[in-house]
Image (cartoon, rainbow, N blue to C red):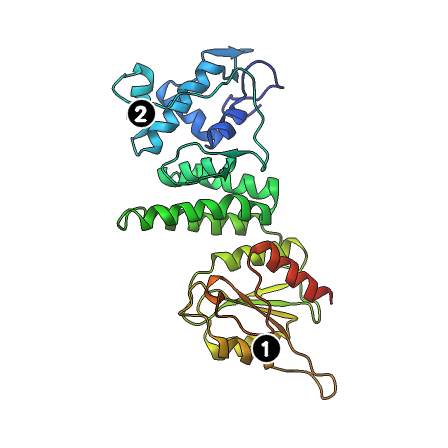
Amino acid sequence: MQADGYAEEPRGGGLTTGELARRLGVAPTTVRTWDRRYGLGPDDRTGGRHRRWMPGDVARLERMCALTATGMPPAEAARVVRTQEPSVPLPAPPDTASPQRRPPLRARSRAGTGLRLGDARQESKGIARAALRLDAAALEGLLTAVMEEHGLVAAWTEVIMPTLQAVGRKWEGSGERYVEVEHFLSWHVSGALRRCAPPVVADRPGATTVLACVPGENHTLPLEVLSAALAERNVPVRMFGGALPVDSLVAAVRRTGPAAVGLWSQSRTTASRPLAEHVAAMEWGVRGARRKAAVLTLGPGWAGHGVPGLPHPTGLREAVAAVESLVAG
């Protein structure tokens, strides 16, 4: 039993609090707060303390989510839900006749969040809602859950990146609005990566990968994801973050003697073909046994701006596979 009295029972009639939270795309603590603070708890209580959320209860909280996602304060949204004011348009609740497990990654949703998510994964809906509400607790819980359940590569490729892209489109089409949502979401994704990533892998001779943003480039999040995904696969990584100066990059490569160097560029204005060629030509080691690192040009900045002979993985899966192949070789 949990300390706050919302113990979960084996599956029976209705949804448990945890199942309902996953269905709504919010943290379980949010559901419990709405119950205690605003009286939006279930009509039925099993065994005195257990919560079972029936179809009417689920529909009530779905309306609560829809209203708070528009920016309405939770207290006001709860008042509207309780009184069922007809002047406020609410989405029709989906069929909740039977309990549902959290959808697997193959499940998709076109549910409205204010963002153009299109044919997005189900988990994107909850993450988008939490980001729009600037709900830190819910967002952290959802991000951690999707990373732990599906792994970093699938979580990023199929859930997080589409949500970030939707936020970016919202910002671009809204006249500088929603910038705070983009920064908020990116910050919490970075934090979730640090919590969920395995410990740093110790160096192995000839197996280390150096990751850095090229000079002038400060978009580090994709490299953070790649670093965590490689650690998940027991590949040693040395991450140097944003806008690493040329001299510092050269020094880092010489000091680590890596098998691979990943250079991230978000914009064509920062992609530097001479820099990539210079790093690719660097050698170290004793005479007769000199070694070089394989240089990967990473990010959209290199598109149409690539360097002959240097691999340019187009996505996270491809980048992980390329590095693993280089390290294994």
Q: Pick whichever, 206 or 200, lies toward us.
A: 206
Count the labels in the image. 2
Residue 280 got which mark?
Answer: 1
- Evaluate whether residue 72 shows in this view: yes
Which residue shows up at 43% across the image and 19% down it?
59
Mark whose residue sits in front, 2 or 1? 1
In the rendered structure, the answer to whether residue 4 lies left or right of residue 81 reads: right
Secondary structure under badge 1? helix
Q: Which amino acid does the dot numbered 1 rest on?
A: Ala
In the rendered structure, which disc, 2 or 1, sits on the residue that comes first in sequence?
A: 2
| x, y percent for residue 144 | 53, 42
Instruction: Check residue 77 in the rendering and tell me which mark sits there, or answer none.
Output: 2
Given residues 243 and 7, the one toward you in this image is: 243
Point out the residue furthest to the front here.
304
* Distance of label 2 from label 1 (alpha carbons): 58 Å
| Image coords of residue 180 (percent x, y) | 33, 48
Q: Amino acid at mark 2?
A: Ala
Q: In percent of the image, x 51 and y 35: which residue is there?
A: 122
